[in-house]
Amino acid sequence: MILNQLLKRRLRMWRRAPAYFVGKFHDRVFGVDESWLSKPREAFPVGSWQWLALTETTYGGFNIGVASKANRGGDRMSPFFHRYGVIYEEFLESLLPRREQSLTLVEVGILNGSGLAIWCDLFPNARVIGFDIDLRNFAANRAELEAAGAFSANRPELYEFDQLDLGRSALILKNVLGGTKVDVAIDDGCHSIESIKTTFENFMPHMAERFVYFIEDNFDTYDVLAPVNRHLRWFQRGEMTVSTRPFRP
Ligand SMILES: C[S@@+](CC[C@H](N)C(=O)[O-])C[C@H]1O[C@@H](n2cnc3c(N)ncnc32)[C@H](O)[C@@H]1O
């Protein structure tokens, strides 16, 4: 029974993103081309997966020891691990012509801050806001990030925030955002389906007319959120679910 459900879930996932899984399969069978690793990020277009992965490596990647193995962080963009770089490239592409403008990007779950460092480089004039239940990992790692060049172009705002506390986090969001609308939201926090639903519900009133909302590390997100939010567009790429209202060119 459980095996049957798991198999059906897997089939749904493959059907929703065949090209993504063909790419993944190809890399698994033939290995990942590693030539990009020896190049500087400037060799690649800003926002490409290579640029994102090399920027993540600059700001720690797997090299930074963090408090919890479960919350490892820094493993998102590279094709060797989560392989989210290709997904961020795909869905942020339409925003890149506006990358010098004043967008608002929010990341829930910041851990050691390598994600915030990437976003600040990618969107130098954006309001970049990080929320986390525990800001101590970031505080402990900030000097190391800055020594590697992070936050020279843009500095993030940071707030303590528990995704699972709907009432309190709604109030925090209202106070922090005021009237500011969010163009890009990233949920890389607790990853439970409950926290994902609560966070999505909380953020929706604050999303811009056109937005992209990334939800990492949960295979069930699409099946839970897409059917009850049909007015939005939904995409699943394995453990990553993306919701959008497309940007105007
Ligand atoms: C995978 S890490 C985030 C990694 C980060 N985005 C990066 O740059 O790679 C998950 C983070 O979620 C935070 N977190 C866990 N439960 C949370 C909750 N209920 N509310 C807010 N943040 C939470 C953890 O403290 C941890 O820093």
Image (spheres, rainbow, N blue to C red):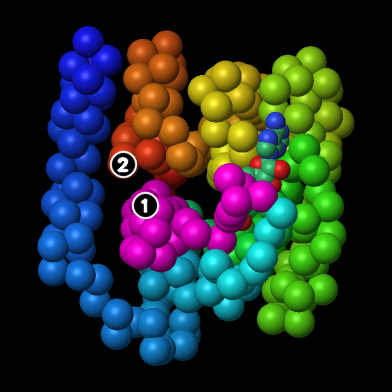
The quarter of the displayed image where residue 114 is located: bottom right
Which quadrant would the N terminus be assigned to in this image? top left
**Labelled pair 2, 1 in contact (Cβ < 8 Å):** yes
Magenta span includes 90: yes
Residue 237: which numbered mark, if any? Answer: 2
Q: Could you tell whether 62 is left or right of 81 in the image?
A: right
As shown in the figure, which amino acid type bears the numbered disc 1?
Ile
Q: Position of residue 143 (x, y in %)?
A: 82, 73
Q: Could you tell whether 204 is left or right of 238 in the image?
A: right
| Local SS, label 1 | helix
Magenta span includes 167: no
Overall secondary structure of the magenta section: loop
Q: Position of residue 2 (x, y in %)?
A: 27, 15
Which residue does the image show at 73% across and 18% down from the upper left? 166
- Say which of 77 and 75 sits in front: 75
Question: Is residue 230 visible in the rendered structure shown here?
Answer: no
* Up-down relation of residue 211 to residue 85 (above or below): above
Q: Position of residue 215 (x, y in %)?
A: 49, 37
Q: CA distance from mark 2 to mark 1?
A: 8 Å
What's the magenta region?
A: 68-94
| Local SS, label 2 | strand
* Up-down relation of residue 215 to residue 51 (above or below): above
The quarter of the displayed image where residue 14 is located: top left
Q: Which residue is mark 1?
A: 87
The quarter of the displayed image where residue 155 is located: bottom right
Q: Position of residue 131 (x, y in %)?
A: 74, 42
**In which quadrant of this rendering is ligand 1 seen?**
top right
Which residue does the image show at 20% across and 70% down from the upper left? 31
Which residue does the image show at 43% across and 19% down from the upper left? 225
The disc, 2 or 1, on the residue closer to the chain's N-terminal end is 1
As shown in the figure, which amino acid type bears the numbered disc 2?
Arg
- Say which of 1 and 159 sits in front: 1
